[in-house]
Image: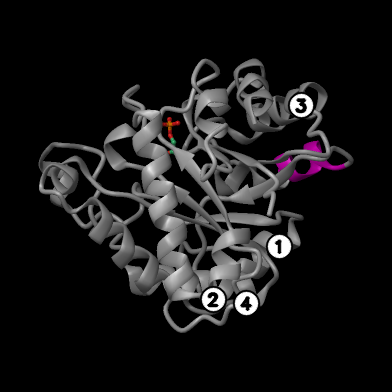
Amino acid sequence: MSRRPFVAGNWKMNYVPSEAATVAAEFAAKITPTANVDVAICPTYTSLAGVCSALRGSKIHAGAQNVFWADSGAFTGFISAPMIKDLGATHCIVGHSETRGKFGKLETPESTVPFFAETDETINLKIRALIKHGLVPILCVGETLAEREAGQTDAVIQGQLKGGLDGISESDLANLIVAYEPVWAIGTGKTCDTPEAERVCGMVRQTLASLVSAGFAEGVRVLYGGSVKPDNAAELFSQPNIDGGLVGGASLKADDFAKVVAGA
Ligand code: PGA
C-alpha cells in the first residue's frame, strides 16, 4: 500500500499572532502541496485563528499543538477540541516531548520538573477528544538520551503507543498519524541517523500491527521528527517506513519549509 506523505510544521512558542498570519500567508504562496503530499502548520493557540484565515483557500492544513480533553467547563487556561475545530483547524499534536511529564529535552535540573505533567493516560484522553470532534491526532512518541543509552528505546516507545491508544477502536484510529521523535534529536541539530530512524519507525509500525491490526499498521502514516532540515529531509523521507516529518526549527521560514516539503 502506498501511503501519502505528510509534513507538519510545529511552530512551538514562536511568532506573535500578527507575524504568524504574515508568515502563514507566505507559506500559502510558496508551498503548493501537490497531489502527493499533505502539509500542515501548527502555530501556538493565539495564532491559530489568524493562521487558519491566512491558509484558507490554500491546500495547507492548520493544526494546534495541544488540547484539553473536556469539551468545556471549569478548566482555567485550557483549550478544547471544539474550540480548535471552530477556527478551522483540522489537526492537533498530542504528547510532544515538550509537554510530556518530564521536560526531557533539557538535561538540566528543570528536566525533572513535571512541567506539564502529561502522561500516557492524559494523552489517551486527548486523542479520544480529538477523534470525537473529527480532528486528526498527531501522536508523538520517542525516547530520551538516557533511555536510549540504557537500551530502552523500543520498550519506551511500545509503552507510549500502548498507553496512548489503549481502548480506542481501530475505526476511531483511522486518521491517526504517529511521529517518532527521539527527544535527544529535537532542536539539537543531532538528527537520528537514517537507518536507525527507519528501524524505529518500522518498529512503531510492527507495534501498531500487534496493538491494532496488520491492515491498520500498513496504512498508518509514521513520521520522523528531530532536527529535520532541508538537506536531510529527502533522505529520511525516502525510507520505506518514514512517511514524512514533524518539523520544528526548519518550519519557521517558508523557504526552508518548502525545501523540506519538496523532500517528501
Ligand atoms: P526540531 O523540532 O525540528 O526543531 O528538532 C521537531 C519537533 O519538536 O517537533
- Is 14 placed left or right of 102 in the picture? right
In 3D space, how far apart are the residues under numbered discs 3 and 2 (Cα atoms)? 31 Å
Residue type at mark 1: give it: Lys
Mark seen at residue 128: 2
Q: Is residue 236 left or right of residue 27?
A: left
Give whichever of 93, 190 is nearer the camera.
190
Give the residue pinned by disc 3: 31
Residue receiving disc 4: 172
| Distance (Cα) linking label 2 and label 1 | 14 Å
Specify which label sits upstream in the sequence, 3 or 4. Answer: 3
Query: What amino acid is labelled 4 in the image?
Result: Asp
Nearer mark to the viewer, of 2 and 1: 2
Q: Which residue is mark 1?
A: 85
Question: Is 53 colored magenta in this rendering?
Answer: yes
| In this rendering, the label closer to the viewer, 4 or 1 | 4
Q: Nearer the viewer, residue 55 or 228?
A: 228
Residue 202 in percent (x, y) is at: 43, 50
In the foreground, 37 or 115: 37
